[in-house]
Amino acid sequence: MLRPENVEICFLILLLDQFRSMDIIENKAAIRKFVKPWKDQGFSVGLVPTMGALHTGHMQLVRESLRVNDKTVCSIFVNPLQFNNQVDLDKYPNTIDQDLQLLEDEGCDLVFTPKAEAFYEGVIPVSYDFGVLGEVMEAENRPGHFEGVAAVIKELFHSINPSRAYFGEKDYQQLAIIRWLVDKQNLSIEVIPCRTIRSKSGLALSSRNLRLSEVGLTKAAEIYKMLNFTRSNKSNYTPQELKEKALTELARNFEVEYFEIIDEETFGRVEEWNETKCPRAFVAARIEDVRLIDNLSLNP
Ligand code: AMP
């Protein structure tokens, strides 16, 4: 039976919860110290790595982590090692105050906001052989990008030691790289994929969209239209014909880096539809000097 003194305690806990503030930590050693007691007490910890300028796509990952784990950590770090283009790095949007407010409102427990110099102090660069993952699309067009991604994720995983880590399918090849890393390093971290969140026009949400004009945003929606066209026309054309159509169509408004139809498990290029059970179309294209990427499963 709930006794009056217990009711008072419950009320007090609820009241304190209202004022529970989110912790923010900048230092790797400090975050390790902060999170360790959680793990020692048997709490599950979800990690959501981001580069900030948070939008609904990121918040979906945070919500999913909050739903499943006892504690949720979000990292905000524009990782210089994964940028092969200095202008892209310099222009990367920063909305840190708004990001922290969003995370606090959502109920995130801890935010990690490291500074690059301290974060990588003493870290020895490692080169990886990602196999075919390291040869196509993002790897081919952004040399060093996935080495940078692997470096940041490895440090985050070692500092926070999460039970689960959340990644968006929008960066599908990155998701595969993270799975590869977890597998190679034998880490007991569950990698959780989350679907791509899009605006009404179909454009995949991205922090880089903040750099587009109204006209650019409207034109950028063509990317999703072309991905959908590819999916709807599988029975009418070969993969190569659809690729050529997409490249021609997109070239009207974009500088296209690639449009590929790939087996989403092997990352091998699909020449014939009967070669694969899980074809996926991938695109990278620039508009108004902003590089956008997207992908879509070609299965119904
Ligand atoms: P970023 O801040 O761009 O590095 O993204 C951080 C995480 O959010 C990555 O796992 C992304 O794949 C994911 N993400 C970014 N945009 C979206 C989106 N529109 N839908 C789902 N996940 C996303």
Image (cartoon, rainbow, N blue to C red):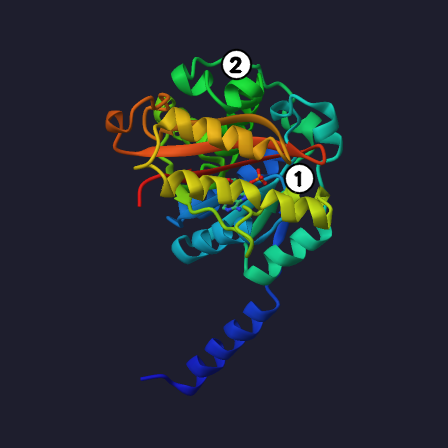
Q: Quick one: which residue is furthest to the bottom in this view?
A: 4
Residue 1 is situated, as x and y percent measured from the top left of the image, at 31, 84
Q: Residue at x 50, y 79 (%)?
A: 11
Say which residue label 1 marks.
26
Disc 2 residue: CB within 8 Å of ligand 1? no
The answer to which quarter of the image holds residue 183 is top left
Q: Nearer the viewer, mark 1 or mark 2?
A: 2
Is the residue marked by circle 2 packed among few (<14), some (14-19), or many (20+) residues within 10 Å? Answer: few
Quick check: 187 above or below 63? Answer: above
- Label 1 sits on a secondary structure element that is loop
Residue nearest the viewer, comparing 200 with 244? 244
Inspect the image, locate mark 2, and give the three-letter code of the amino acid beneath it: Val
Q: Quick one: which residue is furthest to the front in this view?
A: 236
**Left or right of 241 in this view: 294:** right
The answer to which quarter of the image holds residue 2 is bottom left
Residue 41 is situated, as x and y percent measured from the top left of the image, at 40, 49
State how far apart marks 1 and 2 are (Cα): 24 Å
Say which residue label 2 marks.
126
Is the residue marked by circle 1 packed among few (<14), some (14-19), or many (20+) residues within 10 Å? Answer: some
